[in-house]
Image (cartoon, rainbow, N blue to C red):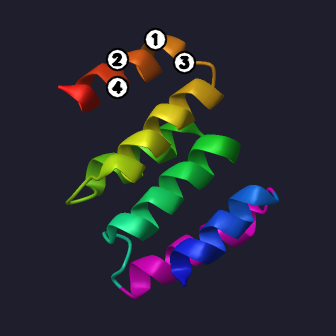
Amino acid sequence: MVSSVLSACAGVVWIEQGRSVHAVAVKACVEGNVFVGSALVDMYGKYESIEDAQRVFDEMPLWNLITWSAMVSAYAHQGHADMSLALFEEMCA
């Protein structure tokens, strides 16, 4: 449910509401969940800062294809094509 709400916040540019949901996820100890983490990376990558997206990505205990893709997309969306390509290559390795 938390990942769905975060995706909705990212889709309609509700960054403050997304930050509030992030705080709820931290209190509920679900921010490390791969789906919640991926949704957080996606939300921060689209509408906030690449630093927040990278921090969430780095703190995740496990990454899957969705998580990697969200981070690659975040870098691309923020105009960091070189970092996006480097991360994609790391993902493929």
Q: CA distance from mark 1 to mark 3?
A: 6 Å
> What secondary structure is the stretch in magenta mostly built from?
helix
- The answer to the question of whether label 2 and label 4 lie on touching residues, with beta carbons closer than 8 A, is yes
In x, y percent, where is residue 16? 73, 65
What residue does disc 3 label?
80
Residue 82, label in figure: 1
Contact between marks 1 and 3 (CB within 8 A): the answer is yes
Tell me which amino acid carries mark 4. Leu
Label 1 element class: helix
Judge depth for marks 3 and 4 and give the one in front.
Answer: 4
Q: CA distance from mark 1 to mark 4?
A: 9 Å
Q: Above or below — where is 81 with respect to 73? A: above
Reading the image, the residue beneath label 4 is 87
Point 31% across, 69% down: residue: 32
| Percent of width and height locating residue 15 | 72, 59
Along the viewing direction, whichever of 78 and 64 lies nearer the viewer:
64
Image quadrant holding the N terminus, namely bottom right
Mark 3 residue crowding within 10 angstroms, few (<14) / some (14–19) / many (20+)? some
Task: Look at label 3 and name its amino acid.
Answer: His
The residue that disc 2 covers is 86
Residue 24 left/right relative to 46 = left
Q: Tell me where residue 23 appears, x and y as whole percent.
A: 52, 76
